Image (cartoon, rainbow, N blue to C red):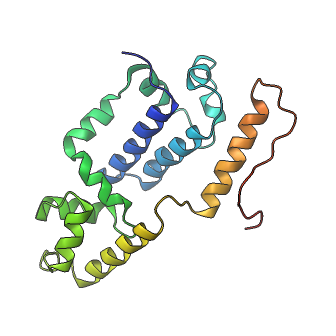
Amino acid sequence: MAMLDTSEVAKLLHEFGQRTAFRGGNPYRARAYTRAAENLLAVPEPLERLVAENRLTEIPSVGNAIAITKLHRTGGHPVLEAMRKEVPAEVLKLLTIPGLRPEKALKLHRELGISFVAELEQSVKEDRIRPVKGLGASLQKKILQGIEVKRQSEGRRHIHRTATLLASAEAQLKRSPGKLTRITPAGRFPTRM
């Protein structure tokens, strides 16, 4: 199998984070995978070079426990493969709804067979969620609000995460072997937070 590039590894890390959240383990570990995926995408150097030079830990949020090398070289990881058997891929999309925690998303899938955001929205509107123990009217309201927030914020990031990614990209560019003399971020981004 050919080695995976940066974007492919970042997708797998993001999936790793989502599936870790579904398992109900340490929430910090799940977020660490997601942050590592985002920060990996901000690195200008080829992933192959970073792996070969053993420099992955220079990337913010990437420690020795993050499975980038194995994902890059083999295209998979045994733990990820095991987690894929537990929860279908489409259910991961439920985690994109702000305020819907993994344990509730998993319960919605297991108890009501909900796998897609559209199904979830329809189920809430038809009042099929409230009768399930542990779910209720307040969760239904929260889900509808979360779906609306998701629609309005599509393609956006929190300013603090954007600032971190921008700083990481600048630092990586400064360390890159090219002869860059000046690095200036362009576009609309508030300089004060």
Q: Is residue 134 visible?
A: no
> Is 183 placed above or below 95 here?
above
Residue closer to the observer: 35 or 45: 45
Question: Can you say which quadrant of the picture contains the C terminus?
Answer: bottom right
Q: Which corner quadrant of the image does residue 131 belong to?
A: bottom left
Q: Residue 83: where, in percent of width, then height?
A: 27, 40
Q: Residue furthest right?
A: 181
Q: Which corner quadrant of the image does residue 82 belong to?
A: top left
The answer to whether 29 appears left or right of 147 in the picture is right
The answer to whether 104 appears left or right of 169 in the picture is left
> Is 142 placed above or below 41 here?
below
Question: Can you say which quadrant of the picture contains the N terminus?
Answer: top left
Residue closer to the observer: 85 or 26: 85
Q: Is residue 114 visible?
A: yes
Residue closer to the observer: 168 or 27: 168
Q: Residue 59: where, in percent of width, then height?
A: 63, 37
Q: Residue furthest bottom?
A: 137
Q: Residue 45: where, in percent of width, then height?
A: 65, 28
The answer to whether 135 appears left or right of 191 in the picture is left
> Is 79 placed above or below 145 here?
above
> Is 116 placed above or below 179 here?
below
Q: Residue at x 71, y 55 (%)?
A: 187
Q: Residue at x 34, y 65 (%)?
A: 101
Q: Residue 143: where, in percent of width, then height?
A: 31, 74
Q: Residue furthest front?
A: 187
Q: Residue at x 30, y 52 (%)?
A: 92
Q: Which corner quadrant of the image does residue 175 belong to?
A: top right
Q: Residue at x 35, y 47 (%)?
A: 20
